[in-house]
Amino acid sequence: MTKQNTPIRSICVYCGSQPGRDAAHIQAGRTLGKSIADHGLRLVYGGGTRGIMGAVASGVLAAGGEVTGIIPEFLMDKEATRHSLGQLNELVVTVDMHERKHTMFERSDAFVALPGGIGTLEEIVEIMTWAQLGRHRKPMVFGNINSFWNPMLELLQHMRDQGFVHTAHLVQPLVIERAEDIVPAILDSAAAIGREGETEIISKL
Ligand code: AMP
C-alpha cells in the first residue's frame, strides 16, 4: 500500500515488555506491526525486543516498514538488547525516562495502547492527561484485544460519571477490538479532526 494523503506519518505503540498469558496479544502485536508497515507509516516505540513490544517491531520490519526505537540508556544495558536493537531503522537513546516519553510524544502522530502492564498504563494515561490539558489532538487508541482494557474503560467511565474528567470532549480515546482495524480507525479519526479544524477556521472568517 502507498502513503495516503493524511497528517499521520508515525504511530506510537505502547505495550507490554512481557508476552502475557493470552497468545492473542502477541498475535495482535504482529498484526498491528504489519498493518503500520502496509499503510506506509513508521512505528515509534520503546525499543524493547521482547514481549508484545518485540512482536510489534518484528511485525513492522518483516513487512518492510520503518521502526524508530526510543530507549533510555539504562534499559539498553539492563536488557542487553544492543545487538537486536541494531535491526531497527533508527534508535534514539535518551538520558532518562522523562526525555524518552517526551521524545516518543513529539515523534508520533497517534498513540496506541495494546495489552501491557504498569509501564503501558502509565504511558497512555500521560498522553490522555496531555490531551485533557489541550496540549495535543493526536488520535489515541485502546487496542481492546479480547476485552483486555475493559477494566480501564470502566474506570474512565466511573471517573466521568463522578465528575472528575474535565474537558471530557478532549479525552475521547478510540476503543478498537481488532488489531487490523486500528490503523484505519486512526486515519479516519485524523481526517475527521482535520475537517473539524477547517470548520473552526471557516466559522472564524
Ligand atoms: P510494561 O507494560 O510494564 O511491560 O511496560 C511497557 C512499556 O514501558 C513500553 O511501552 C515501554 O515504553 C516501557 N518499557 C518497559 N520495559 C521495557 C524494556 N525492557 N525495554 C524498553 N521499554 C520498556
Image: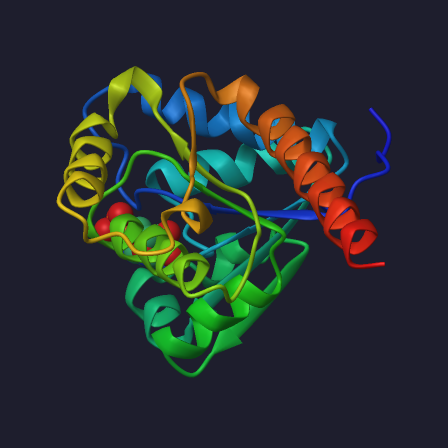
Q: Name the quadrant of the C terminus.
A: bottom right
**Which residue corresponds to the image point at 62% horizontal and 35% vertical from the top-left?**
60
Left or right? Give the position of 16 relative to 141. left
The image quadrant that residue 161 belongs to is top left
Question: In this picture, is 8 found above or below 150?
Answer: below
**Which residue corresponds to the image point at 28% horizontal and 33% vertical from the top-left?**
19
Question: In this picture, is 109 found above or below 94?
Answer: above
Q: Name the quadrant of the N terminus.
A: top right
Figure quarter occupied by ligand 1 = bottom left
**Which residue corresponds to the image point at 34% horizontal and 25% vertical from the top-left?**
144
The image quadrant that residue 194 belongs to is top right
In the rendered image, residue 91, in percent from the top left (x then y), is placed at 59, 64
In the rendered image, residue 132, in percent from the top left (x then y), is placed at 40, 58
The image quadrant that residue 55 belongs to is top left
Left or right? Give the position of 173 relative to 163. right
In the rendered image, residue 87, in percent from the top left (x then y), is placed at 61, 51
Total labels: the figure holds 0
Question: In this picture, is 183 found above or below 47?
Answer: above
In the rendered image, residue 117, in percent from the top left (x then y), is placed at 21, 45
Front-most of 180 and 68?
180
**Which residue corresponds to the image point at 33% horizontal and 38% vertical from the top-left?**
51
Question: In this picture, is 46 found above or below 58?
Answer: below
Front-most of 107 and 70?
107
